[in-house]
């Protein structure tokens, strides 16, 4: 990119972007551009204002810091347990790598972390923290259901009005603020331990803690944290919790009364929810439960499960022949 | 809320209704705002935070809107970007405005990204004729898409462009005059940028056409020694209050909002800041104590704009 006194707005914005998003700061970005013969510091100084008190490079560095730390803050808010699990230094480096690969492409910060769980699954950090991708998926699911569409949950009365002789043909619909997750590690219990640990975020118990998005930071400036903030000047380490066991696990995440909940599931309930999500009938769910059980026990198990779904408010509708409620 | 019942309460000079003194609606204060009457006249909601499908923020804004006038204030319009206008974003903003019937919709005179990427920061424009043409044309297209004029806010900045041919206030005034948009004049941002770039904040106020100013912002900032940083995490400082007093005298009654976005204190502290703004305002313009010089927007009713510029 030749500056050469050009004032083309697009190229100016592209240069500005390149300078403020460089992970090692504006100075390193200029050096890199200079080596590539694209721009050098004198030409930069002819484009941007600066003086002895505050040279152009330092002025641009203010924007570079605001860029990174605003996005770091956002991801720390959406992934507090992932941050607690790896510690702030590793999380900082993870976010640096993530933003290089996935800069925000949405007008809202709400979606910044959308690809972080998948990104973690391919990141070297996974070697030391093999459960991290699962933990991040749980956190993102919680963030996702927080502002999913509002739907009135199915009431017991509506369910009771189903003709008993046709109940097996009926199909449930789940609320939009619901997610069924499968993990390779037992991250639900790990999430709770992090919550209970000093390094976790106290007061956000699994069934009551709601990440409240929509707070935002307005247009307030962001800056790098004060390096003297830690009394020892050292980066705090993550809590010394045993890593979660590597074992197949399932969980559901849902929202009720504007509060986000999650809980672990046994595989049988997870398979039944798979069937609900696939639009299968209550009869088909009962068949699933009948394997290896007497009819009485299978019916009782189905009843308890549906009772739990009703109490948690994850069912939106029950319908016969797709249109009959 | 009765979205279609808004009378046109515009002032005689074409400015929208004087809403009084408000504060930004922040999640830390959701419960407080809903549980007890607030000693403020109106709220400003950050548009992007409510561009969602459901959940608590939308419910809170719905209930706040039933009681108070609301203004939608965005941070991602990116009116100065060389990227195409984001039509999906405009559709969401339009839907939000139709649902909540804000007194007006505002954003910033800046760019926030390029090449499809978003910095989520308010980045400065060069103040050139080419940039002016570019911004004016985009503002007009946004206003056509939304079916209403918008207001644009001056941003705090830390670097400027040597090839700028206009002062920031000249650029802002020209954008407003040519496009028909209003001006959200951030008094703190004027103070911060004046210090960072060495201009006279009084000259800034004098360069802004009074009839284009719809709203004031007031906020705190941080003094970093070599520069001021617009952190919105402190009380408004005395020199900014003094600049505000000068602005009130110059621009007459202008809806005023306290912004506090980080290290957010108890709501009562914001009420105190808002009361201080009200006291300065009323002292500067005592005639408001008599027969109403301007119309005011009633709580719980849309104070919509009825006329295009």
Image (cartoon, grey):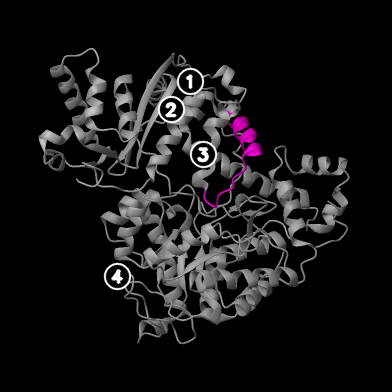
Q: Nearer the viewer, mark 1 or mark 3?
A: 3
Label 1, label 3: how far apart the Cα atoms are = 26 Å
Q: Is residue B184 visible?
A: no
- Label 4 neighbourhood size at 10 Å, few (<14), some (14-19), many (20+)? few
- Position of A274 with respect to A135 (left or right) is left
What is the chain identity of the residue bearing mark 4?
B
Residue at the image point whose x is 62% and y is 43% from the top: A103
SS for tag 2? loop
Residue sitting nearer the eye, A249 or A203:
A249
- Label 1 close to label 2 by CB (< 8 Å): yes
- Residue B278 in percent (x, y) is at 41, 70
- Relative to A78, say whether A105 is above or below: below
- Relative to A170, say whether A37 is above or below: below
Magenta-colored span = A91-108
- Quarter of the image holding residue A10? bottom right
SS for tag 3? helix
Residue at the image point whose x is 48% and y is 67% from the top: B105
Q: Does the segment drawn in magenta span residue B147? A: no
- Relative to B298, say whether B65 is above or below: above
- Residue assigned mark 1: A239
- Label 2 neighbourhood size at 10 Å, few (<14), some (14-19), many (20+)? many
- Residue assigned mark 4: B2
- Quarter of the image holding residue B174? bottom right
- Label 3 neighbourhood size at 10 Å, few (<14), some (14-19), many (20+)? some
- Residue assigned mark 2: A200
Q: Are marks 2 and 3 on the same chain?
A: yes
What is the chain identity of the residue bearing mark 3?
A
- Residue assigned mark 3: A114
- Residue A179 in percent (x, y) is at 37, 34
């Amino acid at each position: 990119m030749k500056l050469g006194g050009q004032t083309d707005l697009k190229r100016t914005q592209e240069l500005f972007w390149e300078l403020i998003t460089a992970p090692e700061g504006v100075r390193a970005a200029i050096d890199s551009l200079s080596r590539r013969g694209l721009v050098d510091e004198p030409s930069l100084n002819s484009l941007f204002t600066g003086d002895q008190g505050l040279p152009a490079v330092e002025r641009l560095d203010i924007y570079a810091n605001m860029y990174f730390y605003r996005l770091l803050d956002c991801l720390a808010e959406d992934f507090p347990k992932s941050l607690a699990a790896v510690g702030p230094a590793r999380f900082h480096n993870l976010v640096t790598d993530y933003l290089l690969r996935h800069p925000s492409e949405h007008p809202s910060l709400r979606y910044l972390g959308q690809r972080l769980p998948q990104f973690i699954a391919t990141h070297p950090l996974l070697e030391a923290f093999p459960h991290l991708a699962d933990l991040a998926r749980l956190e993102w699911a919680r963030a996702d259901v927080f502002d999913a569409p509002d739907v009135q949950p199915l009431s017991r009365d509506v369910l009771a009005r189903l003709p008993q002789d046709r109940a097996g043909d009926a199909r449930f619909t789940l609320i939009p603020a619901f997610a069924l997750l499968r993990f390779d590690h037992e991250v639900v219990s790990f999430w709770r331990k992090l919550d209970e640990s000093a390094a976790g975020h106290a007061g956000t118990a699994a069934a009551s803690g709601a990440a409240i998005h929509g707070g935002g930071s307005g247009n307030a400036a962001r800056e790098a944290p004060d390096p003297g903030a830690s009394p020892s000047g050292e980066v705090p380490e993550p809590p010394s919790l045993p890593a979660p066991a590597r074992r197949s696990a399932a969980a559901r995440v849902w929202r009720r009364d504007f509060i986000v909940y999650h809980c672990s599931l046994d595989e049988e309930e997870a398979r039944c929810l798979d069937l609900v999500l696939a639009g299968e009938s209550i009869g088909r769910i009962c068949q699933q439960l009948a394997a290896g059980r007497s009819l009485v026990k299978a019916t009782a198990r189905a009843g308890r499960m549906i009772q739990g779904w009703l109490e948690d408010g994850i069912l939106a509708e029950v319908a016969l022949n797709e249109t009959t409620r | 809320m009765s979205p279609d019942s808004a009378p046109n309460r515009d002032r005689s000079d074409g400015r929208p209704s004087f809403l009084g003194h408000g504060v930004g609606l922040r999640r830390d204060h959701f419960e407080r705002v809903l549980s007890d009457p607030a000693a403020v006249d109106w709220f400003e909601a950050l548009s992007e935070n409510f561009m969602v499908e459901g959940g608590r923020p939308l419910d809170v804004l719905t209930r706040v809107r039933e009681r108070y006038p609301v203004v939608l204030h965005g941070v991602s319009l990116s009116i100065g970007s060389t990227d195409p206008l984001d039509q999906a974003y405009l559709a969401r903003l339009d839907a939000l405005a139709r649902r909540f019937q804000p007194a007006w919709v505002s954003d910033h005179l800046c760019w926030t990204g390029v090449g499809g990427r978003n910095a989520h920061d308010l980045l400065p424009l060069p103040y050139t004729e080419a940039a002016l043409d570019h911004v004016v044309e985009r503002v007009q297209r946004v206003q056509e898409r939304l079916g209403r004029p918008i207001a644009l806010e001056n941003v705090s900045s830390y670097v400027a462009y040597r090839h700028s041919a206009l002062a920031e206030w000249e650029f802002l005034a020209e954008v407003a005059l040519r496009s028909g948009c209003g001006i959200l004049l951030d008094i703190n941002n004027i103070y911060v940028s004046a210090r960072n770039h060495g201009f006279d904040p009084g000259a800034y106020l004098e360069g802004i056409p009074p009839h284009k100013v719809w709203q004031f912002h007031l906020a705190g900032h941080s003094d970093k020694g070599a520069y001021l940083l617009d952190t919105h995490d402190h009380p408004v400082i005395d020199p900014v209050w003094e600049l505000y007093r000068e602005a009130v005298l110059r621009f007459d009654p202008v809806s005023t909002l306290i912004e506090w976005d980080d290290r957010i204190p108890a709501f009562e502290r914001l009420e105190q800041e808002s009361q201080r703004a009200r006291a300065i305002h009323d002292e500067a313009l005592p005639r408001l104590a008599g027969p109403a010089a301007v119309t005011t927007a009633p709580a719980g009713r849309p104070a919509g704009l009825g006329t295009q510029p």
